[in-house]
Each structure stands twice: as structure tokens, then as C-alpha cells.
Amino acid sequence: MNFNTSLLHGSAIAKYPGREILPPISQVSAFRYESMEELEKVFLHKSMGYAYTRIGNPTISAFEQRLAQLEGGATAVCCSSGMSAITASLLAVCQSGDEIIASSGLYGGTIDLLRDLEKLGIHTVFAKRLTKETVGEMASEKTKVVFGELISNPAQLVLDVPAVAEAAHERGIPLFVDATTATPYIAKPLTHGADVVIHSTSKYLNGGGNSIGGVIIDGLSFPWDVNKHTALADFKKYGKRAFSIRLRTDIWENIGGCMAPVNAFFNYIGLDTLGLRMEKICKNADLLAHALDEIEGITVDYLTLEDHPCHAFVDKYLGGYGGGIMTIRAGSKEKAFRIINSLKYAMIASNIGDLRTLVIHPASTLYIYSGREEMEAAGVYDDTIRVSVGIEDAEDLIADFTQAIGSVMER
């Protein structure tokens, strides 16, 4: 099956007990059993079943199974948010004294999280650019995971997954990839060598901007060595499942960052149109970027522009698509604000991946607590406008941005 057919008719689309065409919303806290013996087996993981929504729920399971299939993974764990997913995945393999190698151009919230992990004794070594060479130079016995974004937000730097995975695997280290801005419609990192894929489902997977969530998808490809990854020592008998078993039955369950059943449902139905939305979003972004690139006085950054430093990856790894994020440098913070405030259709909001086009000034919002060096590594400057392109008619978006930029530049 091709992408859109697989979305609607893939093996993860179950036959639900009441003949529903969508999974019912099991909006409950707990599940009733006829005997204590039966419930005991569920708690001991000796019998399939649900006991408490924090540790499992059929609506959430339906969404997890669908995401695992979509990414070509084996298991998936849904979390309360994208940040919760990143937190749980890193804590499942790291403990005090361990190190993470990460790109310095990560999303601002992820940078803040890695700072918090320092207080737990988990240190992050930042590479200006995450490459095969930098992983080789920075890796040590303390390194337990390499973490990067497939398409960084908002810098739009593309991770060379096969090369970075090779360097990490040679040293017994897994590669975790945040693929939120790409989505499995554009690329599937597990097929290129990544071991774990993470998404903020709040973004493109949901599409409607109506619910928060995150997911961790394990390809069950990494041969975990508990002598190196001592955090997994108690799960040695599970082999390649050590990470996913510890994640679900230990870290994720105990921290309590579960997804709400109703949010799982909203994300599930949003996923139905992922292919259609991404096709339109990427086309709009490409048209808008090329149109605005002709305007003097601003600088446009988008992957399908030929002068973009990662342009070669568009065809190599991204199926010819550039994603839905682009940036504009206006020349000053004042001009950036005036352009944003002059837009008629684009909404000023801090999300991405919505049906609607959204704009924000990241330096004064998402990166407000970051230093200048961290901001610039993420492609954020005082005059940067981040645009999350939606599914409006491209002609209207081009006209709107053109008039907004023109009205500011003419002054």
C-alpha cells in the first residue's frame, strides 16, 4: 500500500468491538475485573489487559499501534507531550554520570530540558553540527545516546542519519531522532539507521492544533549492551527490547507522563489526513519561499531554495520535500515585529504543524532564555521570523506576505 492507503487500511487499523470505524474513547481512570487473580496477572504482565489509564488504555494503544506501523517501528509509547517523550526516552538509557551528544541547534525547549538533566548528573556535549566526524570526536565511554532533529526547528539543518548512525553504532551508542518537523510522510529515520524516533504529536501528526501529545517509537534494532548501558541492567533478558520494556514498565509508567485518552483520539483522527496535509503544506512552503526570495531587503531560508546548505538532502533523504517550516530575516527586530503584525492570514501563535499558517518571533518567545550563541546555532536572530506554513491557497499566502513585507520595507 502507498502512504495514504496505508494510513486508512494498514494492519494497525483494528476491528473494534462495537464495529466502530474509529477507536472508541475509553475516557476512564481504571478498568474493572471479575477476580483479584485476574487483575494480579495484569499487574505482573502475565496477562494482556488494562488496569489503570496511566499505564495503559485501549484508545491510546490504538494510536500507538498506528504510529509504530507508520514509522516502520516495532513498538510505540505515547506521552503527554513531545517534551515528555524526549524526557522519558533519555531517562530510560541515561543515569547520573552519563553523557549525551546532541546538536547545539536543537529546539529551545529541548535545550532547556538538557540543562535540567545536568542537575541530575546527566551531561550533554553539544556539537555545533551533528555529523559522523563530530560524533567520532566527542564520543567517550560515558556517552549513552546521540540525539538530534531530522529537520531542525527553525534552523532547517538536516541530520545525515545514515552517517551519524554509523558513527554512533561503531561505538555502541544508539541514535535517537526527533522527526517532528519531517513526519513519516517525508522521511522515516528508522529505515536510514536511527534506533528510536520521537515526535511531538501536537504538531503535524495531529494537524488541527487541538491536543498535546508525544510518542517514542522503537525500531528494536539496537543490540543493547547492559555493561555499557547500565541503566538497562535489570532488563538484560529482554535483549533488543530492553529499552522499550524499561521505558514502558519503569520510566514512563513511574513518571506518569501518559497521554489522555481523548487526546489520543483527536491525534488519531488527525493522522487520517497527514499525507494530504503534508503534500499541500510542502507545496505551499516551496511556492511561498521562492516568491519571497525575490523580494529585496529580506533573507528567506527554506530547504528547497538552491542556496540552502542542506539543499542536497531534499532529494537524498526527504523525498523532494522541504517541510513546513521556513524563516525570514527582516533586518531588525522592529521590522520583524511590523511584518508579523501586518499579516492578515497568518496567525501569531507558538505552535507549528497546524492547518493554518502560524508566525512567531522566536528570539523573544521560544528562545527568550537562551544565550546568543545557542540562538544562533538554532538559526535564530533578533530579526528572524519563523513561519509554519498551512494549507491556505498559496496565492493568498504569497499576496499576504508580499504586502506585509512591502509595507514595512517602503518606510
Image (spheres, helix red, strand yellow):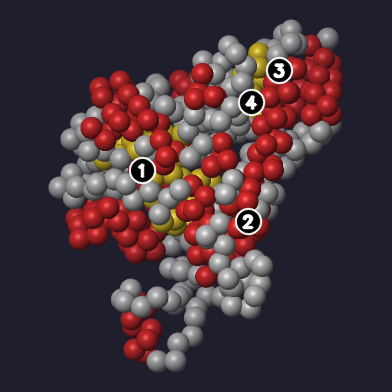
Q: CA distance from mark 3 to mark 4?
A: 11 Å
> Which residue is outermost to the top?
296
Q: Secondary structure at mark 2?
A: helix
Is the C-beta separation of discs 1 and 4 under 8 Å?
A: no
Relative to 110, say whether 266 is above or below.
Answer: below
Q: Secondary structure at mark 3?
A: helix
Query: Which x, y percent locates residue 382?
Result: 61, 19
Q: Amino acid at mark 1?
A: Asp
Tag 3 residue: 290
Front position among marks 3 and 4: 3
Relative to 157, 2 lies left or right: right
Relative to 298, say whether 363 is above or below.
Answer: below
Nearer-the-camera pick, 69 or 399: 69
Q: Amino acid at mark 3?
A: His
Q: Earlier in the sequence, mark 4 or mark 2?
A: 2
Q: Amino acid at mark 2?
A: Leu
Tag 1 residue: 195
> Which residue is outermost to the left?
227
- Using the rendered view, name the quadrant where residue 165 is placed: top left
Tag 4 residue: 326
- Quarter of the figure that contains the C terminus: top right
Is the C-beta separation of discs 1 and 2 under 8 Å?
A: no
Going 46% across and 34% down the picture, which residue do you hit?
149
Q: Amino acid at mark 4?
A: Met
Q: Earlier in the sequence, mark 1 or mark 3?
A: 1
Q: CA distance from mark 4 to mark 2?
A: 30 Å
